[in-house]
Amino acid sequence: QLGSDRAAYYPSLDLNANAARTKQSALGGQFDYQLTSYGPELNLLYLLFDLGGRAADAESSRLALLAADWTHTSVVQDVILGVQQTYVEYLNARAQLEAARTSLTQAETTLEAARSRREAGVATIADVLQAQTAMSQEQLAVDRLSGRVLALRGALATAMGLPATTPYDVGELPAELPLDFASKTVEELIAQAQAARPDLAAVRLQAERADVRIRSVRADGLPSLIAAADASRTYYDPSTFASYGDSWSARLALRIPLFTGFETKYNVQKAKQEAAVAAAQADTLEQPVILQVWTSYYGLQTATQLVKTSRDLLASAEQSERVASGRYREGVGTIIDLLAAQAALADARAEEILARSSWFYALAQLARDVGVA
């Protein structure tokens, strides 16, 4: 469109070909005269001066091109965020599956211990049944997570633009996180988003384009100067006096619109109102952008704290499980205490994995909201 609007700065040149067969009568029909004429014609038309109309049209298209580029960037960032989030969900599911398998192994060990104690006569069948129930629950969790891992594997392939059946491999959810990665303040990130968000830049350019449109519409009611030229050669058959004849003309045309039924006036008013709407839309979008950065920034802060807290919880649960397991093996603890400690440990593992996943998820969201994803 930009190239099309810039064509107004160049002259237009047309080549036409004409052919005619004419029959004429002379002296009251006493004589008939037939003539065949044919030949080429060149027409040149050049807009010399228009008080800014074509400049406004070209500038409008240039701003539309920039807005389209920013919109494209915004779509690319959305795709990146979708891949990142699905990737983190997949890693989280895989880590949760490994944790569930670890819990299942512990439950199997506990079941064996309960059976051994019952055979030794220091435990009842109730202990074995409770341990069996706990192991079945862990097996159910493993089965459920196995299906989720496969589903997310296909979802990640689709997010990458590949068939869900594509074989591929990815890494593991990192155990160590750069928790101090986001060192900027929320005010700095908001300022960065206001300058770098592609969707916001696209809306601002559309508002600027609507403002330029006013100049384009106003130019329709202003004078313009046009140069035109024609050149042709006509061949005659029969060639009574000459076999061909050349002709040409050149002219300048000044167009001054005097009255158009107030069309230009109302078109200008319409363009002004559209520019006001576009400017308001740009201002309206800026507030949600600030809110998004604010929300995602403190979401990342919360995720950072959850990682630290969940690690403390996991360390405490591991120690509690070791104590309960030792007490049960020594015969001074109950199966209920051991199973409760193992359940708390399984929950702590799941929470710690979820906290790490949520941190990466929040970081990706913050990067997208700031406009650097």
Image: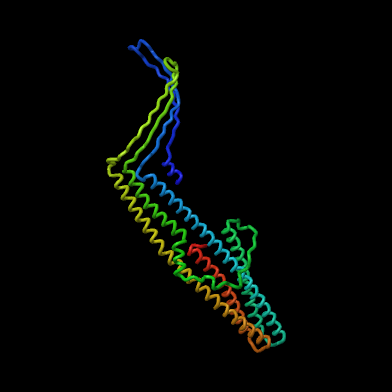
Relative vertical location of residue 73 with respect to residue 220 in this rendering, above or below: below
Residue 230: name its quadrant.
Answer: top left
Q: Residue at x 44, y 16 (%)?
A: 239
Q: Residue furthest top?
A: 30
Q: Nearer the viewer, residue 167 or 60?
A: 60
Percent x, y of residue 354: 56, 72
Residue at (44%, 33%) from the top-left corner? 14
Front residue (pair 43, 28): 43
Q: Nearer the viewer, residue 220 or 48?
A: 48
Q: Residue at x 40, y 25 (%)?
A: 247
Q: Is residue 26 left or right of residue 311?
A: left
In this figure, which colouring scheme has been used for the structure? rainbow
Tell me residue 17's x, y (percent): 45, 27
In this view, 359 is above or below 163: below
* Residue 292 image position (x, y, % from top left): 45, 66
Q: Is residue 314 above or below residue 193?
A: below
Which residue is situated farthest in the bottom direction here? 332
Residue 299 lies, in percent from the top left, at 49, 71
Asked which quadrant contains residue 240, the reply is top left
Is residue 199 found left or right of 134 in the rendered image?
A: left
Name which quarter of the figure residue 205 lies in: bottom left
Left or right: where 309 falls relative to 34:
right
